[in-house]
Image: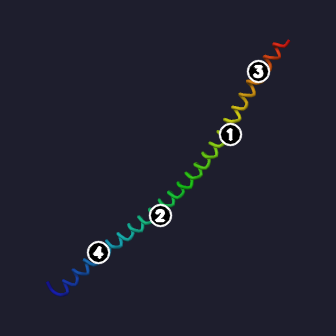
């Protein structure tokens, strides 16, 4: 093998490696971009989850308040029924 043939072979190998390196760079950039998209989606999901948790906590407070209101109304209804029964007995 002559010196020129050897140099030509080395250049061909370097060109092949350069092509593979460029392909790896493109794939790596794609993976980085996909990772950034997934991080953004994850952050958005966390924000939505926090908002839902806030709504649930608020709903729980409203349910507790309404349960107290219902208990009050049931007690008042029972008192009114007793009053009506007593008034009917007086007649």
Determine the secondary structure under disc 1: helix
The N terminus, quarter of image:
bottom left
Dot 3 crowding, Cα within 10 Å, few <14, some 14–19, many 20+: few
Which numbered disc, 1 or 4, marks the residue closer to the eye?
A: 1
Q: Which residue lies furthest to the left in this view?
A: 1
Q: In this view, does 39 lie above or below 23?
A: above
For residue 52, side relative to residue 27 (left or right): right
For numbered disc 3, what is the local secondary structure?
Answer: helix
Q: Is the C-beta separation of discs 2 and 1 under 8 Å?
A: no
First in residue order: circle 3 vs circle 2: 2
Which label number is shown at residue 65?
Answer: 1
The C terminus appears in which quarter of the rendering? top right
Label 4 Cα crowd, 10 Å radius (few <14 / some 14-19 / many 20+): few
The secondary structure type at the circle numbered 4 is helix
Question: Which residue is label 2 attached to?
Answer: 36
Marks 1/3 in contact by CB < 8 Å: the verdict is no
Q: Nearer the viewer, mark 1 or mark 3?
A: 3
Spatial CA distance of label 3 from label 4 is 93 Å
Answer with mark 2 or mark 1, whichever residue precedes in sequence: 2
Earlier residue among tags 2 and 4: 4
What residue is pinned by disc 3? 81
Which quadrant would residue 7 be assigned to in this image? bottom left
């Amino acid at each position: 093998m002559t010196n020129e043939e050897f140099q030509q072979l080395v250049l061909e190998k370097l060109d092949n490696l350069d092509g593979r390196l460029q392909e790896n760079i493109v794939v790596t950039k794609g993976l980085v971009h996909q990772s950034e998209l997934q991080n953004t989606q994850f952050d958005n999901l966390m924000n939505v989850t926090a908002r839902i948790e806030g709504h649930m906590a608020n709903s729980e407070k409203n349910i507790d308040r309404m349960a107290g209101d219902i208990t009050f109304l049931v007690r008042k209804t029972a008192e009114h029924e007793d009053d009506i029964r007593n008034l009917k007995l007086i007649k």
